[in-house]
Image (cartoon, rainbow, N blue to C red):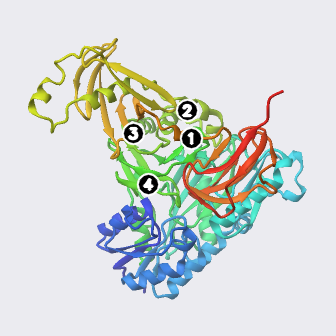
């Protein structure tokens, strides 16, 4: 008989660790966190009853060290380990080591993990079970007729180690890059190829199984809106599926679970073509990032059920009936307009209003570092209908105050309000078609700059009473001037306290300015970061980050023309073969590869010319803005 769990260690970090701890507390369990050095004061550490340090910063030295995690569990007196998702969650050897150490493993049997660990082996197993599959393509013999191809890492997920190839000349380099990324992320460089289905839908089935032969298929989820093959918006149930297709997906998922004697929570993923044909993609032998939408629709706590199944409890023969619709958006610290560039730094404010569920690993004042995924939070809305859930989620995100980092918030709002999404016309090519329109420059920041200037000039609550009473009654003879930049645009604001063309000042305080703009009353919430280098202005007209411009700019802020600066902190993982000062380069040629937040980013030549300086070497850690190289542009004929 499996012993009852009393203390749980979560072998993970961030929002999923916080989420698991929440359920553990509700069940009366003691909780133990593990953390790397950069995560010493992270929210998941603060949320646990006890925490154990994993010395180091990189995942390979910390969260991927199963031996250290087990040692931490035993030292802290935990009797069970929950892996969350990512890191060690689909590592069969780690699962065995947990069990061999006398700890309860909150996950499927190691044999089931092993059977599904390699996508290539999993597909062979599913083919034998009669589940429909895409035929693999041998990259060595691929022809133009096989294009486009999708390269995928055999050992992992989350979009890492994946590349779309549309030109055979690019296949060799794409294989190398995919394999290198797979080694970095999963320790296994095996990559395989299959046809890339244009405008397919990503549909998955949540399963839950116990040790007594019961397997639940908990509906479907649509996860088609993706960037870099990673999901951005998910919903349950998957809209617009015929009943026959939905039933066949349920049956295939249950068959996949039974084929490997599955136990616990898992997900079976399918690609559904535009004409409604489903193909097995993979089985994730763990909890999924998007599990909250299933929880909302079925009224379940999947983590609580994972724990009960691990203790040997039997599930009811049938699951509860689903109600309503749920939609989840992943809020990332990234700039979609700049090739999804991840952002690092201090998150000054994270405040999301509305009747929505928020799973996050951050609070205001926390730092987003370079070593881990840049997801800040998952925001989930549940309502009786899809339209209501989508509207509630978009409204909550639009009203959020997120200060300190560029995020994908505007992209999420635009996606949820896009006519195609509203009509449930979903496929994995959504952002290929609409990214440019969804990342257009934010609304003019001129009015926001005026509000910032008025707030800056408003008397502080700590000022003498006379100053506070008279601050907006004495009109100065000359207008005041403030200068800001926002998204690369410069704004110069000249203002009197009460006199502005088209704008009437109704009130102005340090953090709240109320203006009448073209006859409409608007409230502008103003906040400065701790060192006054940025001003954040939020209103119904949009969110703006303004950088005050000093009266006398520092001439040292300029850089040499052609300078290539690090777009983020990270590690130089590769320098182009033969690249050295004096080399001739062409515009758009990859010169360096920088790894940050689990993704590989190419640094391209800005123009054709001569490389006059190279400061980067493989393995070098670089900070944001570090000078990597200089390209002297060749004169135009």
Where 472 sits versus 47, above or below?
Answer: above
Q: Are marks 3 and 4 in contact (CB under 8 Å)?
A: no
How far apart marks 1 and 4 lie (CA) works out to 24 Å
Lower position in the chain sequence, tag 3 or tag 1: 1
Lower position in the chain sequence, tag 3 or tag 4: 4
Pinpoint residue 327: horizontal percent, then vertical percent: 46, 45
Lower position in the chain sequence, tag 1 or tag 4: 4
Pinpoint residue 34: horizontal percent, then vertical percent: 43, 73
Front label number (2 vs 3): 3
Asked whether residue 251 is in view, the answer is no
**Residue on which disc 2 sits:** 438
Lower position in the chain sequence, tag 1 or tag 2: 1
Element marked by disc 1 = helix
Q: Residues within 10 Å of mark 4 (few under 14, many from 20)?
A: many
How far apart marks 1 and 2 lie (CA) works out to 9 Å
**Residue on which disc 4 sits:** 292
How far apart marks 3 and 4 lie (CA) works out to 35 Å
513 or 113, nearer to the observer: 513
Rendered image: mark on residue 336: 1
- Residue at left 15%, top 35%? 463
Front label number (3 vs 1): 3
**Residue on which disc 3 sits:** 534
Which quadrant would the N terminus be assigned to in this image? bottom left
Q: Are marks 1 and 2 in contact (CB under 8 Å)?
A: yes
Element marked by disc 3 = loop
């Amino acid at each position: 008989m499996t012993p009852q769990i009393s203390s749980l260690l979560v072998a993970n970090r961030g929002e999923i660790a916080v989420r698991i701890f929440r359920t553990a507390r509700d069940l009366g369990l003691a909780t133990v966190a593990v953390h790397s050095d950069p995560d010493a004061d992270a929210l998941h550490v603060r949320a646990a009853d006890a925490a154990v340090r994993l010395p180091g910063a990189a995942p390979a030295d910390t969260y991927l060290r199963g031996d250290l995690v087990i040692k931490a569990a035993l030292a802290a007196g935990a009797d069970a380990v929950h892996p969350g998702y990512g890191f060690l969650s689909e590592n069969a050897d780690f699962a065995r080591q947990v069990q061999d150490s006398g700890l309860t493993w909150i996950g499927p049997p190691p044999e089931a993990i092993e059977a599904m660990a390699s996508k290539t082996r999993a597909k062979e197993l599913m083919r034998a079970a009669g589940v429909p599959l895409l035929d693999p393509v041998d990259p060595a013999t691929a022809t133009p007729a096989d294009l486009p191809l999708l390269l995928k890492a055999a050992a992992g997920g989350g979009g890492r180690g994946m590349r779309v190839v549309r030109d055979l000349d690019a296949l060799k380099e794409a294989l190398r890059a995919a394999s290198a990324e797979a080694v970095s992320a999963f320790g296994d460089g095996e990559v395989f190829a299959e046809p890339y289905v244009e405008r397919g839908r990503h549909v998955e089935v949540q399963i839950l199984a116990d040790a007594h032969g019961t397997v639940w298929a908990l509906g479907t989820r649509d996860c088609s809106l993706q960037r870099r093959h990673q999901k951005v918006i998910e919903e349950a149930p998957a809209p617009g599926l015929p009943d026959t297709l939905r039933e066949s997906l349920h049956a295939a998922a249950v068959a996949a679970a039974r084929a490997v004697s599955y136990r616990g929570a898992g997900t079976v993923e399918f690609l559904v073509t535009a004409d409604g044909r489903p193909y097995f993609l993979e089985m994730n032998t763990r909890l999924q990032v998007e599990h909250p939408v299933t929880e909302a629709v079925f009224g379940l706590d999947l983590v609580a059920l994972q724990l009960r199944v691990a203790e040997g409890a039997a599930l009811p023969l049938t699951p509860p009936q689903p109600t309503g619709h749920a939609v989840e958006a992943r809020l990332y610290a990234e700039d979609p307009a700049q090739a999804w560039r991840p952002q690092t730094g201090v998150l000054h404010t994270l405040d999301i209003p509305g009747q929505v569920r928020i799973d996050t690993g951050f609070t205001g004042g926390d730092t987003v570092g370079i070593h881990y995924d840049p997801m800040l939070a998952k925001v989930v809305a549940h309502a009786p209908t899809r339209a209501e859930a989508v509207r509630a989620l978009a409204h909550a995100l639009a009203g959020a105050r997120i200060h300190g980092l560029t995020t994908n918030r505007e992209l999420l709002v635009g996606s949820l309000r896009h006519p195609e999404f509203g009509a449930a016309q979903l496929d994995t090519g959504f952002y290929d078609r609409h990214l440019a329109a969804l990342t257009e420059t934010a609304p003019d920041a001129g009015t926001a700059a005026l509000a910032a200037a008025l707030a800056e000039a408003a008397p502080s609550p700590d000022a003498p009473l006379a100053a506070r009473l008279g601050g907006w009654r004495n009109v100065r003879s000359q207008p005041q001037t403030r200068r800001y930049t926002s998204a690369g645009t410069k704004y110069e604001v000249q203002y009197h306290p009460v006199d502005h063309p088209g704008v009437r000042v109704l009130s102005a305080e340090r953090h709240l300015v109320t203006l009448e703009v073209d006859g409409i009353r608007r409230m502008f919430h103003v906040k400065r970061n701790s060192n006054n280098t940025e001003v954040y202005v939020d209103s119904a007209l949009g969110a703006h980050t303004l950088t005050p411009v000093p009266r006398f700019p520092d001439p040292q802020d300029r850089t040499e023309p052609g300078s290539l600066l690090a777009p983020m902190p990270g590690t130089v993982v590769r320098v182009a073969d033969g690249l050295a000062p004096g080399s001739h380069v062409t515009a758009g040629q990859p010169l360096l590869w920088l790894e940050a937040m689990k993704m590989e980013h190419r640094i391209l030549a800005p123009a054709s010319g001569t490389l006059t300086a190279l400061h980067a070497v493989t393995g070098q850690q670089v900070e944001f803005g570090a000078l990597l190289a200089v390209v002297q542009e060749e004169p135009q004929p």
